[in-house]
Image: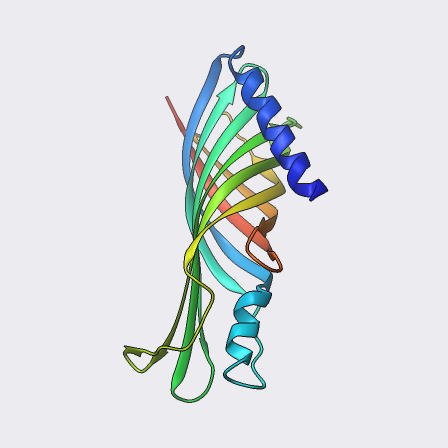
Amino acid sequence: MKFKLAVSLLFTLALFSYSNAGLSGLGLGIQGGLITGYDNPGLENSVLDQYTNFELKNNMTDIGAHLKIGTLRVIEFELNADYSWKKQNIDSTLNLTFSDFSITALVKKSVSLTSLKPYIAAGVGLHWLAYSLSLGEDVVGVYLPENKSSIGYRIKGGIELDFPVFPFTPFVEYQYNIISVSGDDIKYNSIIGGITLDLP
């Protein structure tokens, strides 16, 4: 609860300060990586109610895009859109598919060290979670958590390689995510790499 409150407070304060700051740059980019430590107790327990000896795999593939908005106060705002998914065999004929599409708004602070720019960021977003069980090509009617939208919280830190002569900036970052759902929250880590194209 303290984590969620801290992220929300940071994001709110940054939005208030934005009205007094000017734009210093825009960027548009793509990213991708691996989700690890995916912990979704509600989904795992729902499948265990029907199939014993099941263990939810804790890694997923993630791809996405982002929009960066810089300000004169060296605070940046980011809008991230991400899609992650996993297809897992429950037995020889039955497959579980789970996915997460999210849009997250973040406040980002970076420090310039020549061409290296370490940064930290925090934000709040909306996640659309989807689950299904399929037997071959047919979806089967076994109970799973309801497909719905949920509030999520993200903190991240990373490093950008900022070369002024090039119009693009590669980066690598670590993310920690929490999604608020009924019962136990969903939690996971992400290792993400990508590139941002600086817009004129």
Side of 95 where 162 appears, left or right: right
Is residue 140 something that shows in the picture?
Answer: yes
**In this image, 190 relative to 29: left or right?**
right
User: Does residue 190 sit above or below 60 in this rendering?
Assistant: above
Image quarter of the C terminus:
top left
Residue 8 place in picture, x, y as percent: 61, 34
Residue drawn at 54 percent across, 31 percent down: 162
Which x, y percent locates residue 180? Answer: 57, 51
Q: How is the image coloured?
A: rainbow
Q: Quadrant of residue 188?
A: bottom right
Farthest residue, direction left: 137
Give the left or right position of residue 118, taking residue 61 as reference. Answer: right
Q: Which residue of the protein is positioned furthest toward the bottom in this rendering?
A: 92
Q: Residue at x 46, y 56 (%)?
A: 62
Please tell me in which quadrant of the rendered image residue 184 appears: bottom right
Percent coordinates x, y for residue 176 in the rendering? 62, 49
Q: Position of residue 37 (x, y in %)?
A: 62, 63
- Eyeballing the image, is 141 above or below 2? below
Q: Residue at x 59, y 20 (%)?
A: 74
Residue 1: quadrant of the picture: top right
> Vertical placement of 164 versus 177: above or below?
above
Say if residue 165 shows up in the picture: no
